[in-house]
Amino acid sequence: MVASKKQKKAMESINSRLALVMKSGKYTLGYRSTLKTLRQGKAWLVIISDNCPPLKKSEIEYYAMLAKTGVHHYNGNNIELGTACGKYFKVCTLSIVDPGDSDIIRTMPSTGEAQ
């Protein structure tokens, strides 16, 4: 029960930081635009939902590794990620181009980052 409380608090923290990025920063939603920003080297952080197809997930992780960009695996499905972004549609992947006022880049545990 303690672990679930910690996960819930972390999820709320991620959602609030994500909402601040949506309000004050620049981002791209979707698989194709995420790949474009990764190829151009503009992405700072990539967030992938839980139920993203494995082939797409591995391709995005590979591009992020080449671009030395952090990848965060969101602990909810694509409907919950879309809701966290303040949208009324599903979001499988999202790339943050400019975090704005949010400190999401520093606080996210960026897994898959090349060292």
Image: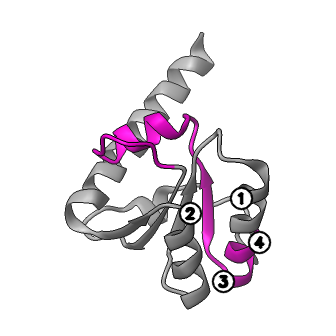
List the single residue furthest toward the left. 23
Q: Which residue is mark 3?
A: 67
The kind of residue on which mark 4 rests is: Tyr
Query: Do tag 4 and tag 1 residues touch (Cβ < 8 Å)?
Result: no
What residue is drawn where x is 50% and y is 77%?
Answer: 43
Q: Secondary structure at mark 1?
A: helix
Q: Which residues are magenta?
A: 62-91
Residue at which label 2 appears: 31
State which tag comes first along the sequence, 2 or 1: 2
Which comes before the other along the chain, label 4 or label 2? Answer: 2
Q: Does label 3 or label 1 sit earlier along the sequence? A: 1
Closer to viewer: mark 2 or mark 3? 2
Q: Position of residue 44 (x, y in %)?
A: 50, 75
Secondary structure at badge 3 equals helix
Q: Are marks 2 and 1 in contact (CB under 8 Å)?
A: yes
Q: Nearer the viewer, mark 3 or mark 1?
A: 1
Are the residues at dot 3 and dot 4 in contact (C-beta closer than 8 Å)?
no
Q: Is residue 80 magenta?
A: yes
Residue 84 left/right relative to 71: left
Tell which circle, 2 or 3, labels the residue nearer the N-terminal end. Answer: 2
Residue 98 found in image quarter: bottom left
Number of other residues with Cα within 10 Å of mark 2, as a class: few under 14, some 14 to 19, many 20 or more: some
Mark 1 highlights which residue? 56
Is residue 97 shown in magenta?
Answer: no
Specify the quadrant that holds the C terminus.
Answer: bottom right
Q: Which residue is mark 4?
A: 62
In the image, 57 versus 22, the foreground residue is: 57
Q: How far apart in space, not on screen, are marks 2 and 3 (Cα)?
A: 16 Å
User: Residue drawn 77% across and 71% down?
Assistant: 62
Q: Is residue 102 left or right of residue 69?
A: left
